[in-house]
Image: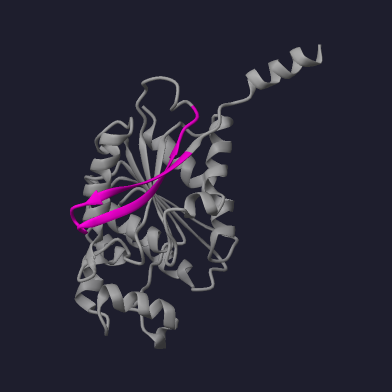
Amino acid sequence: MKIAAAILLFAAAPAAAEVRSGSFSSTSLRREVAYAAQLPPSYSSGARRYPALYVLHGLFEGPAFWERRGLTAILDGLWQKGLVPEMVVVAVDGDNSFFVNGPAGRWEDMLSRDLVAHVESAYRVTPGRASRALLGVSMGGYAALRLALAHPDLYRAVAAHSAMLLEKVPTPEEGAGRWHMSAFHRIFGDPVDAGLWAANDPLALALKADPRAAPALYFDCGTEDRYGLFAGNRELHRRLEARGVAHEFGLYPGDHGYEYVRTVLDKSLGFLGRALAP
């Protein structure tokens, strides 16, 4: 009797998601780039194709952030409860590049061309914008929002947590720390090239965003964000509203970091899941 019950419980247990690590050859960067892919529970059984969600890490992180920070477990739980549709989730190594095309390399092209081409050929994902989404945290949130506004033809839905939105060019006088300034200088020049910064700034891009073309858009920030990023996120909300660009925005209790992200990840994943649903 106990054996039969154990077998029943095992049979009823939901299949677990799988995380695979790999790399691909980026023609834009002329080198191999690492990534990690979280595959949904049903991926191993059948020929079904899935939407693709590309997730972008923050400064001083890498493709392991999605699993190491406990975000794979949150998504797996949402899948098991049927709250988010299954999708293939891909975290790519963006170094500290802000995923910008510039003197440090063509990181935007690596992400939106090379990585997408690899994933759409190596995994069972449905190709094309309608089945493609983007989610970023901090530096990655900046990149996600920038791509949403600069290239609305690439992704069906975009979300960001604690996006690095600054109302002024970063300087030590404006409160940027030494390590952050080092990252800014590597990508945007030393001193920071105001033209290159403006060309990639989501706040500047929002001033000319086309409400008819924009992807489904969600972003939030912690009300106690230690870098004060709630101000830039609130300003983006204001500018998008003025342009008539549909979006969801929220300020929620929390500081800057993954403790905060874990409290709101269900909101962004739910939003993206609804946007990607057939």
- Give the vertical position of 272 relative to 191 (above or below): above
Judged by its main secondary structure, the magenta piece is strand
Q: In which quarter of the image is the C terminus?
A: top left
How many marks can you see? 0
Q: Quadrant of residue 12?
A: top right
Q: Residue at x 36, y 21 (%)?
A: 47
Q: Can residue 176 be seen in this view?
A: no
* 211 over 204 or under it: above or below: above
Q: Is residue 68 left or right of residue 180?
A: right
- Farthest right residue in view: 1
Q: Position of residue 262 (x, y in %)?
A: 57, 52
Q: Position of residue 274 (x, y in %)?
A: 43, 35
Which color scheme does this rendered protein use? one colour
Q: Is 28 within the magenta? A: yes
Task: Report the residue that reaches farthest toward the bottom.
Answer: 173
Residue 103 horizontal side relative to residue 9, left or right: left
Q: Nearer the viewer, residue 242 or 112?
A: 112
Tell me where residue 149 sits by quadrant.
bottom left
**Residue 178: x %, y % from top left:** 43, 83
Q: In this view, does 58 lie above or below 66?
A: below
Give the residues drawn in magenta, as a range: 19-41
- Asked whether residue 145 is in view, the answer is yes
Residue 190: horizontal and vertical position, in percent?
27, 83
Q: Is residue 6 magenta?
A: no
Rendered-image quadrant of the N terminus: top right
Residue shown at the point (45%, 81%) measured from the top left: 177
75, 269: nearer the viewer: 75
